[in-house]
Image (cartoon, rainbow, N blue to C red):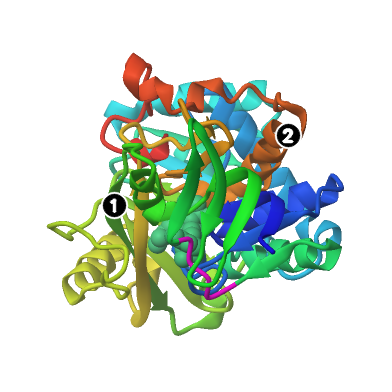
Amino acid sequence: MERTADVVIIGGGIQGASLAYHLAMRGQTDVVVLEKETLASGCSGRTGGMIRQHYSTDLVTEIAKQGRDFFSTFDEVVGGHSGWVQCGLVYMVTEKDREALRHNVDLGRKHGVPTGLIDPSQARDLVPGLNTDGAVAFAFEEDAGYGDGYGSTVAFANRARDLGVTILQGTPAIGLRREGDRITGVLTPKETIGARVVVNAAGPWADRLGRMVGLNLPLKLELIEEAVIRVEAPDTYPIHTPSVYDFVNGLSFRPEGTGHTVVAEGSSYFKGALDPDGYPTKPSDRYIEDVSVRLARAMPRLESGSCRGGWAGLLEGTPDFHPVMGWAPGLEGFVLCYGFSGHGFKEAPVTGRLIAELILDGTPSLDISPLAFERFERGALLRSLYKDDPVMA
Ligand SMILES: Cc1cc2nc3c(=O)[nH]c(=O)nc-3n(C[C@H](O)[C@H](O)[C@H](O)COP(=O)(O)OP(=O)(O)OC[C@H]3O[C@@H](n4cnc5c(N)ncnc54)[C@H](O)[C@@H]3O)c2cc1C
């Protein structure tokens, strides 16, 4: 007899796991999550984990705000270990991004984010040792923080499983069953699972699933590298020191544990096509050297740090660096939830809930229509106000 489920979710990253959790919390536990490897083996286990609410559009600002609030009580509400640390976030920009900074701060305040413009001396007080030379405008987001992608994904999945959801790891979706204009199930190497709704939450592999049913899902992969710099004196950079988005030196950095700094540079050195089944998982020597020089400029007191390695992962970018969320065009029963373009960790607690509402209620509590696939055909792309950094979204 064929196995069936009301909802089959393809992808056990943080998006698929959050959706499974939210469906289960609403009482829908007739759900199967298919993960071809292990939970969080894609982008979610390699995330930098920054949680900010500084965005250019109302919709993403609200998603990020609600996402941050969810993370602040994640461990009590969901269980497990989200790794949430509230440390605040300082932004410093050059002239070309002054207006974007001001706009996003105003937008954040409209959505209840405790954020505001600050002066250079306030920035230096918040992040002792920060070199503010070259920056013309500064902002502080008081309740920003960071978390752990692996821990959060597994926590969502474990709770969903406890509530009755089936999670099949080591189980790839190798085909989608189509009857007319409807997707009615998913093929795995062992069986076909019939479903009322199938969700594509396959991260960097989402376009491959689209091709199985003749859907051209735009997706461009980039490499994001993160270097972990260890600073020898443990008191130099306490864990609750605010993170920094430094547009002067093209860096973001934050403390990690005692005496460590996680630092990422804005653009990638990797040239050529990236294969999600085989990409560099470590930062290159050239990257580490460059990022260390930039960090020493931004924070001279971290100059004595030595690099203790790092990791690299894929940015699953859409043409406008915003996710695709909603029903697939022309295919009933098929939901798209992919392309989070480097900011899907912080958004996941809310985007998972919104897709659960779409499936259960028909209408999500936030209007996600600006994120529909059809925006590419209509030319209604969203955009970041930051001039050279579309990932700021
Ligand atoms: C280095 C790095 C730094 C980042 N920094 C931040 C940050 O600071 N803040 C932030 O918010 N975001 C950040 N991101 C982005 C964020 O991590 C991603 O947007 C998010 O994890 C995407 O989650 P996902 O569930 O959509 O995709 P994934 O985590 O990639 O999950 C997709 C899953 O689908 C599975 N899958 C694929 N195809 C199939 C199939 N056919 N059958 C079954 N399973 C399948 C894969 O194995 C994978 O586990 C960063 C990402 C990276 C790589």
Residue at the farthest front position:
1
At label 2, the amino acid type is Glu
Q: Is residue 151 at all visible to an observer of this figure? A: no
Quick check: 58 left or right of 384?
right
Q: Pointer 1: what residue?
A: 221
Q: Pointer 2: what residue?
A: 357
Q: Which residues are magenta?
A: 169-173
Q: Do residues under tags 2 and 1 come within 8 Å of each other at their CB atoms?
A: no
* Image location (x, y in percent) of residue 56: 47, 26
Position of 115 relative to 385 (above/below): below
Mark 2, secondary structure of its residue: helix
Residue 170 is a magenta residue: yes
At label 1, the amino acid type is Leu
* Image location (x, y in percent) of residue 73: 80, 54
Q: Residue at x 69, y 64 (%)?
A: 1
Q: Residue at x 49, y 27 (%)?
A: 371
